[in-house]
Image: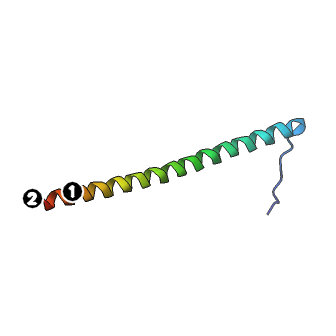
Amino acid sequence: MTPFIFPDLGPYAVEILSAYAGTLALLLILVAGSVWQGRKTRIRLEEFEARRTTKRQKSTENL
């Protein structure tokens, strides 16, 4: 098995590695933001459904 060999990036190593780091950071921010927004939306939906169920139960009791 050959060991991991890092390619020679030449004189542009800093620029290339910083571009990879920036891209990775942006992807992580996007994924974290999507997860956070999804959780927030799910909580709001659960609250809405709970209110809707409560209203529906009250309306059927009045019949």
Q: In front here: 60 or 38?
A: 60
Q: Secondary structure at mark 2?
A: loop
Quarter of the image with the N terminus is bottom right
Residue lying furthest right = 11
Camera-side residue of 8 and 13? 13
The amino acid type of the residue labelled 2 equals Leu
Residue at horizontal 26 percent and vertical 59 percent from the top: 54
Residue at mark 1: 56
What secondary structure is found at the residue carrying circle 1?
helix
Residue sitting at 63 percent across and 46 percent down? 29
How packed mark 2 is, by other alpha carbons closer than 10 Å (few <14, some 14-19, many 20 or more), is few
Measuring from the top left, give residue 16's x and y in whole percent: 80, 38
Q: Position of residue 61 (x, y in %)?
A: 14, 62
Label located before the other in sequence (2 or 1): 1
The answer to whether 18 appears left or right of 46 in the picture is right
Marker disc for residue 32: none
Of the pair 22 and 54, the residue shown nearer to us: 54
Instruction: Report whether 29 appears left or right of 51.
Output: right
Asked which quadrant contains residue 20, the reply is: top right
Coloring applied to the structure:
rainbow
Position in image of residue 39 (x %, y %): 49, 54
What residue is disc 2 on? 63
Q: In the image, 63: left or right of 2?
A: left
Q: What residue sits 43% from the left and 54% below the top?
A: 42
